[in-house]
Amino acid sequence: MALIAVGILLSAGYFLLDDPSDQPWTPDEEKTLESLWIGNLSQPPIDSSNAVATNINAAKLGHKLFFDPRLSVNGLVSCAICHQPSRYFSDGMAKGFAIGEAQRNTPSIVGTAYSPWFYWDGRKDSLWAQALAPLEHEDEHGGNRMAYIRFISGDEVYRPMYQELFGDLPDISDPVRFPANAAPGDNPEWNKAWQAMAAADQESITRAFTNLGKSIAAYEMLLVPQPSRFDHYVETELINDASTQESLFSPNEKMGLRLFIGKAGCINCHNGPLLTNNEFHNTGLVNSAGEIPDKGRVEGERLVRADPFNCAGRYSDSAVNDCAELRFMRSGVDLIGAMRTPSLRNLEGTAPYMHKGQMEQLSEVLDHYNRAPEAMIGHNEAEPLGLNDLELRQLEDFLNTLNGPVLTPIL
Amino acid sequence: MTPASYFRDRGLLLLWLPVYFTLSHAALGQPVGAGDIAFQSTVAGHYEVRFDSQPKPIVINQIQSWVMSVRTGDGLCVKGAEITVVGGMPEHNHGFPTAPLVRPGANDCEYLVEGLRFHMSGRWEMSFNIKAGAKTDTLMVSLDL
């Protein structure tokens, strides 16, 4: 009898042991969860450099341009070739490919309106300045601004849309003043034609070109994420609906979330409603074979300062004192090899991961952060985490709860 | 030189001005701005400092400026001070994401702290080095965002 009693007591003790996945969130943890919640995503910051950023007609023009393959040298490349709506506005490849291969992984555009910097190295400081660069890049759209303005001027749909927003297009009827193709840059023939143009003509073409970028930006600003299962989970926490909460997350997913905001330290960089601080960090990623390690943000800072389309440039609609991000950029050795933190929403749509698409699977990413290897250039900020296989799996399960649709604006 | 005169001459004092801000969701309560904090003086303070933040209250991850008002214990404006600021999040082992600068403001008492950005919630600590004439003081500010 005594043995049976001891047996029963021991078994009872086993079942009464604390199961960490059952523990309620503390008030501080709840506050942290709320900081990640999509309900806290306010309106994007005002882009003072783009006078039509919130203009619905500009967004309509930008939407058309975004999906138009005629905005390219071969008539086959639109922005949507690499920024595919069905792939969360990325392309499912390690590095982007249109006419040629791009240097890096195609970032998703969703939610980028909230970032002060664009590209992995932040070399552009506005959505519109970023939109212009692929249009003239030989591996992307491969075109030139003179040809684009000629196309818009001759198109019976685009011309009135443009003129309603920006006034008259330049009169390009004189073929001597305005050649077929011209743009400053690496194409020798086009650059020669551009340098032969009068300064005032270069100016009017460039200005019209920037207006196209500003329209595309007005559309892109509307691309924001919609609630995911994680957001519903946070809502049940905020309204104390314990029974719904239990049905929303598995114990593993809940443990993964605990790790995310706790021991794994992910929230140090992946914070806020978009799960990114949009800052630049070196996390020790191995470069692609045969390539020089990427200097990252230090190079990006140099480029953005020199960019004629930056906030302080004459095509920007900002007053001089508005360009605070540009004026107060910081330097630091920690920016060597540092890349911009991507959002963790909708990871199922944005594989492969990292700036050169080095990692196909989330498990590889988590393993990388767990080991925190030496960086090839600069210094890896991350420290080894000491997580076991189960914990890594739980983190991955949690990351999969962040998937959700994109707001598709009705234009 | 005695230890007392060493400290007096240096005027090196830590002015602790703990300032707590809670950024709450509208449903949970009224947000608090930096401008709601009154002047605080220290144990043997050379300076008293007050902040007004723009925007009120402090918004996460948006570049912003603060107006900083610096007076002596007698309430006189401290004019022409050289002020520098450093800071970061000690728990997360990083500094400011930007390089803020302090310049003279609208009047003799005021200075403009420009280019501040708090890119995540949590505990931020800032240290203002205030040098006016021969006196240099440090003001420590803690924020819970």
Image (cartoon, rainbow, N blue to C red):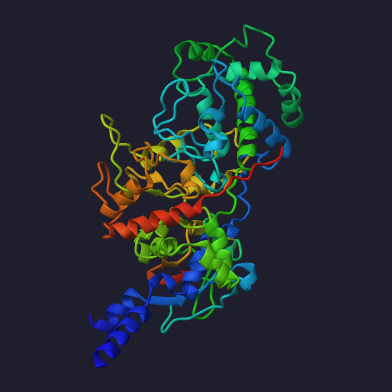
Name of the residue lying farthest toward the front: A1
A174 relative to A105, above or below: above
Name of the residue lying farthest toward the bottom: A2
A406 relative to B41, above or below: above
Residue A186: x and y in percent read 44, 18
Residue A107: x and y in percent read 47, 38
Q: Looking at the rendering, in which quadrant would you find the C terminus of chain A? A: top right
Q: Residue at x 26, y 52 (%)?
A: A371
Out of B28 and A188, give the one closest to the viewer: B28
Q: Looking at the rendering, in which quadrant would you find the N terminus of chain A? A: bottom left
Out of A159 and A197, give the one closest to the viewer: A159
Give the number of callouts. Answer: 0
Q: Residue at x 52, y 46 (%)?
A: A116
Would residue B48 be visible to someone looking at this image?
A: no
Q: Residue at x 31, y 87 (%)?
A: A9
Q: Residue at x 59, y 66 (%)?
A: B57
Out of A90 and A22, give the one closest to the viewer: A22
Residue B124: quarter of image:
bottom left
Out of A351 and A243, give the one closest to the viewer: A243
Residue A5: x and y in percent read 29, 90
B43 relative to A364, above or below: below
Would residue B84 be visible to someone looking at this image?
A: yes
